[in-house]
Amino acid sequence: MSRFEGKKIVIIGDRDGIPGPAIEECLKPIDCEVIFSSTECFV
């Protein structure tokens, strides 16, 4: 059992680091709900 199972997840990725869709792909096997996923540029 993962600590993310049954949770609602907000993902904010970084353009120069790990983008949001990549993090979302990693969470697909886990039973969680991604309610927002975005990639931002932090300058």
Image: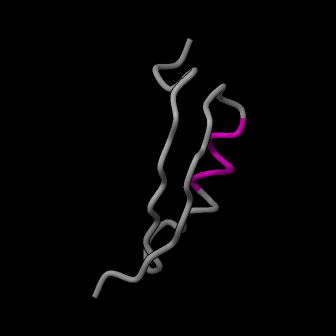
- The residue lying at 46 percent from left, 20 percent from top is 3
* Quadrant housing residue 41: bottom left
Residue 21 spot, x, y in % from top left: 63, 62
Range drawn in magenta = 23-28
The reply, left or right, for residue 22 in relation to residue 42 is: right
Q: Is residue 8 above or below residue 40?
A: above
- Looking at the picture, tell me which residue is in the foreground, 36 or 22: 36
Count every numbered label the image shows and give the total: 0
* Quadrant housing residue 6: top right
Q: What colour scheme has been applied to the protein in the rendered image?
A: one colour
Q: Is residue 22 above or below residue 28?
A: below
Please check the rendered image and state whether residue 27 is part of the magenta-colored stretch, yes or no: yes
- Looking at the picture, tell me which residue is in the foreground, 16 or 43: 43
Query: Residue extending furthest front?
Result: 35
Residue 32 spot, x, y in % from top left: 61, 31
Magenta portion: prevailing SS class: helix
Query: Residue extending furthest bottom?
Result: 43
- Looking at the picture, tell me which residue is in the foreground, 42 or 7: 7
Q: Is residue 28 above or below residue 4?
A: below
Q: Is residue 41 above or below residue 38?
A: below
- The residue lying at 55 percent from left, 55 percent from top is 36
Residue 16 spot, x, y in % from top left: 43, 80
- The residue lying at 58 percent from left, 47 percent from top is 35
Please check the rendered image and state whether residue 8 is part of the magenta-colored stretch, yes or no: no
Q: Indicate the quadrant containing the N terminus: top left, top right, bottom left or bottom right.
A: top right
Residue 37 spot, x, y in % from top left: 56, 59
- The residue lying at 28 percent from left, 88 percent from top is 43
Query: Residue extending furthest top?
Result: 1
